[in-house]
Image (spheres, rainbow, N blue to C red):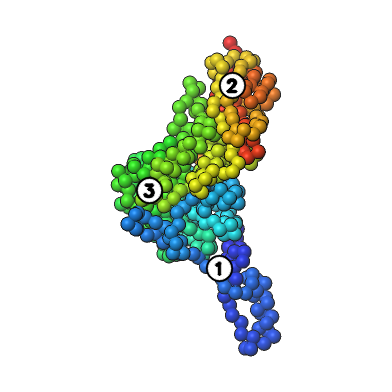
């Protein structure tokens, strides 16, 4: 997006200029028509909606246009219309070039946006160094341009100034200084929306340093997975007094999961993952005095470790039980048509195999309403690259030719000839959506 495009406004923005035709006559009429063509239509310019942070007798509260506003949101690039239909009211971004489009669509749907402003991670691919004044100054200028570009859009809810940029232990003073300088600049440029910075969990010196060194950060964002259900208990014990938002939560990450002898992490089924969303929401979000709401992760699909680890949807667009669970938590009742359930997927025998060996997997799945189900079986090689801290990964090939037989109860598979780690996936569908589970196995090298 160019600066001209950013300055030209949002769809439906109107000009506040008033032309007195009695003064300008036909020339004034012509000028008015040209001005209307340039800026949209004549009328009132779109304005920011004020969002305030208020401390009440019952805890912290966001107020948007004077009314209480509890965030029921998700982060990701999935359908905003589907997010609205699920009962949510907000979407989170991390930064990038699509913010304008997200803001415009959110405004049409009655959603708000947590606008992410990306701050560098130290020593990232660009070699950013927080002890380099020139680099920090340029980053601050980027912050300025983002705020000036979007601050008056009526869909803006708050600013997410940085995401997990605090380093491994959260103990570098120069990083916290840069974060607070950025938050202070945001508040100087925009008095209508609060500021937030987002932490990677609560370990190290994160919480005390943020409170001590960042007075211009209004809200603490917390990304938490395996420990999300205990944030409400752990955060105050670490000295947390600022209000918080759970900015990412879902199933345990690969880094938090048990592993096979060949270092492949065990992934929960989509049914088990839905339970983790519920536990996090009940334990640390709903009715907690310091909590302003949350953004579930990930609204969409993404290859990260596997094709199904964090996504609340599959690549083919089918929704998973995480969406059903969040719909129930956001609205108070489950969707009318629910996704299938997988109780178990397991291998018969040992997961260490010789090349070409035929093995069997057993599946237990059901439909909540007794509808017919269908299943798709897939084998993919294991993603053995080092953890990439959220970066997108290349899609892995699907090895369907080695599936000898498969139905809703079992599958027979011929182990690949190439040694290494693999996963067998079972995708179970009904008319509403899908359920998915996978089990890792390993093929030994031939003697």
At 59% from the left edge and 20% from the top edge, which residue is drawn?
361
Determine which residue is flagged by label 3: 288
Q: Residue reaching furthest bottom?
A: 22
Indicate which label's residue lies in the foreground, 2 or 1: 2
At 61% from the left edge and 16% from the top edge, which residue is drawn?
359
The image position of residue 291, as x and y in percent, is 39, 50
The foreground one among 326 and 100 is 326
Mark 2, Cα crowd under 10 Å, few <14 / some 14-19 / many 20+, is some
* 50 is higher (above) or lower (below) than 424: below
Determine the secondary structure under disc 3. loop
Mark 3, Cα crowd under 10 Å, few <14 / some 14-19 / many 20+, is some
* 232 is higher (above) or lower (below) than 372: below
Mark 1, Cα crowd under 10 Å, few <14 / some 14-19 / many 20+, is some
The image position of residue 200, as x and y in percent, is 42, 43
Determine the secondary structure under disc 1. loop
Determine which residue is flagged by label 2: 362
- Asked whether the residues under the numbered discs 3 and 2 touch, taking CB atoms below 8 Å apart as contact, a structural biologist would say no
Q: CA distance from mark 2 to mark 1?
A: 58 Å
Q: CA distance from mark 1 to mark 3?
A: 34 Å
At 60% from the left edge and 41% from the top edge, which residue is drawn?
337
Q: Earlier in the sequence, mark 1 or mark 3?
A: 1
On residue 46, the disc is 1
Q: Earlier in the sequence, mark 2 or mark 1?
A: 1
The foreground one among 170 and 327 is 327
The image position of residue 42, as x and y in percent, is 62, 74
Is any part of residue 416 visible from this angle?
Answer: no
Q: Earlier in the sequence, mark 3 or mark 2?
A: 3
């Amino acid at each position: 997006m160019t600066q001209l495009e950013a300055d030209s406004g949002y769809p439906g923005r109107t000009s506040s200029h008033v032309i007195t035709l009695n003064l300008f006559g036909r020339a004034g009429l012509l000028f008015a028509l040209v001005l209307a063509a340039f800026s949209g239509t004549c009328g009132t310019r779109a304005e920011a909606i004020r969002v305030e942070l208020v401390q009440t007798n019952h805890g912290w509260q966001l107020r948007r246009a004077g009314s209480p506003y509890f965030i029921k949101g998700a982060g990701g690039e999935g359908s905003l219309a589907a997010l609205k239909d699920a009962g949510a009211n907000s979407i989170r971004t991390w930064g990038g070039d699509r913010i304008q489009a997200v803001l415009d669509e959110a405004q049409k749907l009655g959603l708000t946006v947590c606008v992410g402003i990306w701050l560098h991670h130290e020593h990232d691919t660009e070699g950013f160094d927080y002890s380099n004044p020139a680099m920090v100054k340029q980053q601050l200028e980027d912050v300025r341009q983002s705020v000036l570009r979007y601050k008056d859009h009526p869909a803006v809810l708050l600013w997410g100034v940085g995401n997990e940029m605090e380093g491994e232990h959260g103990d570098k003073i120069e990083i916290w200084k840069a974060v607070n300088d950025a938050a202070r600049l945001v508040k100087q440029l925009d008095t209508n929306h609060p500021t937030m910075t987002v932490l990677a969990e609560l370990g190290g010196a994160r919480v005390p340093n943020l409170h001590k060194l960042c007075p211009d950060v209004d809200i603490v964002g917390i990304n938490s997975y395996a420990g999300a259900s205990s944030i409400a208990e752990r955060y105050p014990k670490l000295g947390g007094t600022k209000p918080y938002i759970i900015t990412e939560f879902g199933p345990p990450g690969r880094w938090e999961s048990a592993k096979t002898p060949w270092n492949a992490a065990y992934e929960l089924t989509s049914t088990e993952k839905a339970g983790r969303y519920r536990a996090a929401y009940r334990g640390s979000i709903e009715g907690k005095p310091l909590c302003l709401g949350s953004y579930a992760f990930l609204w969409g699909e993404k290859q990260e470790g596997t094709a199904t680890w964090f996504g609340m949807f599959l690549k083919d667009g089918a929704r998973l039980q995480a969406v059903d669970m969040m719909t129930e938590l956001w609205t108070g009742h489950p969707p009318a048509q629910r996704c299938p359930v997988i109780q178990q997927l397991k291998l018969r025998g040992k997961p260490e195999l010789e090349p070409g060996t035929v093995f069997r997997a057993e599946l237990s799945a059901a439909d909540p309403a007794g509808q017919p189900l269908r299943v798709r079986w897939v084998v993919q090689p294991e993603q053995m690259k080092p953890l990439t801290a959220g970066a997108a990964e290349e899609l892995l090939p699907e090895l369907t030719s080695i599936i000898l037989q498969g139905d809703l109860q079992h599958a027979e598979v011929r182990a690949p000839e190439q040694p290494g780690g693999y996963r067998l996936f079972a995708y179970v569908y009904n008319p509403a959506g899908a359920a998915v589970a996978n089990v890792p196995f390993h093929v030994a090298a031939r003697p």
